[in-house]
Amino acid sequence: MPEGPSIVILREQASGFAGKKIISVSGNTTIEKERLQDQRIEALRSWGKHFLLELDLDFSLRVHFMLFGSYRINEEKSWAVPRLSLGFEHGQLNLYACSVRFIEVPLDLLYDWRVDVMSPQWDPALARTQLRAHPGMLACDALLNQDIFAGVGNIIKNEVLFRIRVHPLSKVGALPAPKLRELVDQARQYSFDFLEWKKQYVLRKHWLAHTKRTCPRCNIPFSKGHLGLTNRRSFYCENCQVRYG
C-alpha cells in the first residue's frame, strides 16, 4: 500500500495535468466516469494516502490505491486494464487496482490538513493532544491511525518505533512526555526521509527494521508478529526497544 510520501511523489509527477481539460475517459470503474469528460483539473492535492483531483469548488475525484494499486503517467500497462484512464491533449493518467470515487463537497470541508504528516499545515501539538486522549492505544496502532497520522503506513511505523527505541506494544499513555514528543516528531521526519530516499530509488537500503531479521544495534534476532488492533506486521527488538506500560 503506498504511504503518504509515495502519494506526494505521484502528485508532483502528475502536476503537469493541473489546468488541463480531460478529453477522454475510460476504465473498468463502476462510478459514473462520464462525469469527468471535458472537466478541467483545477488542482492536484494529496491527504495522507488519498490522491485528490480537484475539478471545481465542490466536485473532486478521490483515488485510494488500497493494497496493490499503481499508476502510469503517459504510458500503459500492456497486461492490465486501468480502473480509470484520463486522457489529455498531451498526456494520459492511468490508475490501476485502486478505489476511485467522487467527492461532492469542497475538499477543505472534508479534510483536516493538520493531521497529514506531509502537509505544510501539519500540527504536532494536535497530534500529541489526540494521543493523550487515547492512553490505552498501542504505539503500533497509534502510528497507523489516519485521524492522527494521515499518510503513515506500516514501513514508517516500524522504522519510527525502531528509531526512537519504543516497543510496538507500548501504551501511548505510558510514554514519558519527551518520548511522546519524539514519536510525533519522527513520524513526520521519517516521512520526509522516506520521500527523499524513494526519489533517489534507495528507500529499501535505509530500512533498519522493516522486514529485517537482525537488530543492527544489538546484533540479535528481531521479533516479528501481527500486532495490535490493526494486525499489521511489526519488526522490533526486544532488547533496545522499551515496552512502556
Image (cartoon, rainbow, N blue to C red):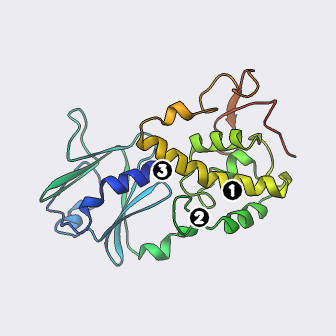
Q: Can the viewer see residue 20?
A: yes
In the picture, the disc for residue 42 is none
Q: Secondary structure at mark 3?
A: helix
Q: Is residue 54 left or right of residue 93?
A: right
In the picture, the disc for residue 184 is 1
Whichever of callouts 2 and 3 sits on the residue coming sooner in the sequence is 3
Q: Is residue 216 left or right of residue 177?
A: left
Whichever of callouts 1 and 2 sits on the residue coming sooner in the sequence is 2
The percent position of residue 53, horizontal first and vertical second, equals: 33, 64
Q: Say which amino acid is labelled 3.
A: Pro
Front disc: 2 or 3? 3
Kindly identify which residue carries mark 2: 115
Question: In percent of the image, x 54 and y 47: which residue is there?
Answer: 193
Q: Can the viewer see residue 231?
A: no
Q: CA distance from mark 2 to mark 3?
A: 14 Å
Q: Locate residue 96: give its quadrant.
A: top left
**Front residue (pair 142, 12):** 12
Q: Say which amino acid is labelled 1.
A: Val
Q: Say which amino acid is labelled 2.
A: Val
Kindly identify which residue carries mark 3: 5
Q: CA distance from mark 3 to mark 1?
A: 16 Å
Question: In percent of the image, x 78 and y 37: which residue is there?
Answer: 241
**Front residue (pair 120, 97):** 120
Whichever of callouts 3 and 1 sits on the residue coming sooner in the sequence is 3
